[in-house]
Image: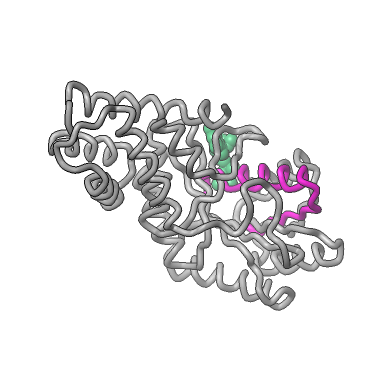
């Protein structure tokens, strides 16, 4: 129900427009396919992914065959969920429990300022803690005072410790301290916030590489997850940010935020498909519980079902 409520705007947009695209049609003809193409492209699914969806749909439905609206929706659900599955699985389970193995489990979070990075980290911390884990946060976005303060605020809300240094400190040094503290305190999971400046590509790459290398002095296979946070309401900007971060560091999974505020939730499908990176979390509001582990099937069903 939270999912349906959070996706209400996208749902309404897509559903109405799909109904419109097939209104009065008795078969799936070129007109229907063209109309669907238009609906997806303008819902920020992206051109390449839209064409893949249309191709898959065409392969499923013989041209000019009669398909009722509900069957068309069902076929779209199936094809899109399958397509999302082909982008790989995230490392952890469908709730906020952690994968077996490494402790502390280290998650490095990247993304530009304003996308909801701190909020997402705060929500994750609260959920991991609720699932019985010992959590430590690291304030390695040392460039903005507000970033450190906000992370501390979320740390208080989630009731988990935050390791920080002063404004302008070396992010890699903060990451090192955080891991050291997590190891000393037998923490289960560490979440490291990183600087959200999109300076030039080399600057970003150097900074993230340095943070990574320093962490590996303490935990050779850290970080176990690199989570890129993108604002789902920014459409093409989100694609562009994904391009830059994927070029700068190894990104394993995505968090797409602010889906409650947009009718263009199709971006979730497009970005994951374009970059072949699975979506792990979706943000559906500003409150501590408004983060969900992404369930492809439920998501797609909520949109088309
Ligand atoms: P950061 O600069 O990337 O760390 O961004 P913040 O975490 O400070 O978030 C920026 C703004 O977006 C804040 O006002 C958050 O409350 C808001 N925000 C974050 N995630 C969501 C979401 O899923 N839905 C909505 N509606 N707002 C969000």
* 247 left or right, relative to 39: right
* 80 left or right, relative to 61: right
Residue plotted at (43% across, 38% down): 300
In what quadrant of the picture does the C terminus appear? top left
Residue plotted at (38% across, 24% down): 12
Residue plotted at (79% across, 51% down): 133
Residue 106 in the magenta stretch? The answer is no
Quarter of the view holding residue 37: top left
Residue plotted at (66% across, 35% down): 289
Q: Identify which residue, 256 or 295, lies in the foreground.
A: 295
Quarter of the view holding residue 31: top left
Asked if residue 33 can be seen in this view, the reply is yes
Asked if residue 112 can be seen in this view, the reply is no
Q: Identify which residue, 202 or 102, lies in the foreground.
A: 102
- The colour scheme of the drawn protein is one colour
Q: Is residue 30 above or below residue 23?
A: below
Where in the figure is residue 82, as x and y percent of width and height?
41, 50
Q: Is residue 69 above or below residue 281?
A: above
Where in the figure is residue 276, as x and y percent of width and height?
41, 59
Where in the figure is residue 99, as x and y percent of width and height?
68, 59
State which region is magenta: 112-141
Where in the figure is residue 6, as x and y percent of width and height?
52, 30
In what quadrant of the picture does the N terminus appear? top right
Q: Identify which residue, 16 or 211, lies in the foreground.
A: 16
Which residue is outermost to the right?
Answer: 185
Q: Quadrant of ligand 1?
A: top right
Residue 113 in the magenta stretch? The answer is yes
Quarter of the view holding residue 164: bottom right
Q: Is residue 80 above or below residue 169?
A: above
Q: Identify which residue, 145 or 304, lies in the foreground.
A: 304
* 206 left or right, relative to 34: right
């Amino acid at each position: 129900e939270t999912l349906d409520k959070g996706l209400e705007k996208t749902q309404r947009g897509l559903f109405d427009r799909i109904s419109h695209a097939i209104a009065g049609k008795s078969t799936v003809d070129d007109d229907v396919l063209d109309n669907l193409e238009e609906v997806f492209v303008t819902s920020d699914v992206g051109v390449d992914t839209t064409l893949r969806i249309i191709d898959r749909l065409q392969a499923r439905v013989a041209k000019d065959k009669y398909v009722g609206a509900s069957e068309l929706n069902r076929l779209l659900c199936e094809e899109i969920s399958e397509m999302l599955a082909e982008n790989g699985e995230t490392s952890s389970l469908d709730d906020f429990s952690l994968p077996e193995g490494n402790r502390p489990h280290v998650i490095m979070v990247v993304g530009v300022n304003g996308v909801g990075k701190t909020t997402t980290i705060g929500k994750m911390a609260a959920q991991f803690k609720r699932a019985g884990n010992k959590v430590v946060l690291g304030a390695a976005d040392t460039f903005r005072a507000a970033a450190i303060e906000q992370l501390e605020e979320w740390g208080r809300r989630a009731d988990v410790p935050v390791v920080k240094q002063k404004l302008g400190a070396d992010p890699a040094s903060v990451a090192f301290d955080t891991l050291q503290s997590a190891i000393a305190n037998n923490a289960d999971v560490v979440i490291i916030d990183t600087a959200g400046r999109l300076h030039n590509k080399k600057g970003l790459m150097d900074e993230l590489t340095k943070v990574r290398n320093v962490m590996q002095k303490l935990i050779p296979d850290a970080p176990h997850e690199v989570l890129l946070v993108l604002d789902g309401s920014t459409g093409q900007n989100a694609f562009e940010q994904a391009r830059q971060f994927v070029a700068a560091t190894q990104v394993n999974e995505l968090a797409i935020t602010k889906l409650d505020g947009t009718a263009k939730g199709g971006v979730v499908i497009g970005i994951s498909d374009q970059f072949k990176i699975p979506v792990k979390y979706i943000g559906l509001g500003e409150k501590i519980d408004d983060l969900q582990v992404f369930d492809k099937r439920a998501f797609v069903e909520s949109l088309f079902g």
